Image (cartoon, helix red, strand yellow):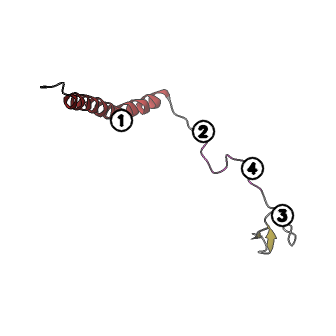
Amino acid sequence: MALIDCPECATDVSEHAERCPHCGYPFEEPSGPDEGGVVLTDIDIGFNDWAVILLKAGLAAFPVAIIAVLLYFVLTIAGTALVGGIGG
């Protein structure tokens, strides 16, 4: 059992106490999981903003697709050359 300081009178109080036994100061427990976090329903983004976000995400993924295609062709040609299909 840990002790905390009462913010009103600075007396050591159990962390499980609902009130300070010395001065009666009420301790509030956290109300729920949404305290201190971001609630996605509070974000107001219009349709045009979503379109821009999706466009940027698509453009960011485009170079990855190009690299994957180039890597596929390089590895295919190298694998064919190793097997003896080119110039053999």
Find the distance from the CA under tag 1 to the CA under tag 3: 53 Å
Picture quadrant of residue 18: bottom right
**Location of the N terminus (image quadrant):** bottom right
Q: Amino acid at mark 1?
A: Ala
Q: Amino acid at mark 4?
A: Ser
- The residue that disc 3 covers is 17
Q: Of label 4 and label 2, which has the lower sequence position?
A: 4
Residue at image location 38% in from the left, 33% down from the top: 56
- The residue that disc 2 covers is 42
Q: Secondary structure at mark 1?
A: helix
Find the distance from the CA under tag 4 to the CA under tag 3: 16 Å
Q: Secondary structure at mark 2?
A: helix
Q: Magenta segment range?
A: 29-39
Please say if the residues under marks 1 and 4 sit with CB atoms less than 8 Å apart. Answer: no
Q: Of label 2 and label 1, which has the lower sequence position?
A: 2
Residue at image location 35% in from the left, 35% down from the top: 60
Numbered tag placed on residue 31 in the rendering: 4
Q: Is residue 56 left or right of residue 86?
A: right
Find the distance from the CA under tag 4 to the CA under tag 2: 18 Å
Picture quadrant of residue 81: top left
- The residue that disc 1 covers is 60
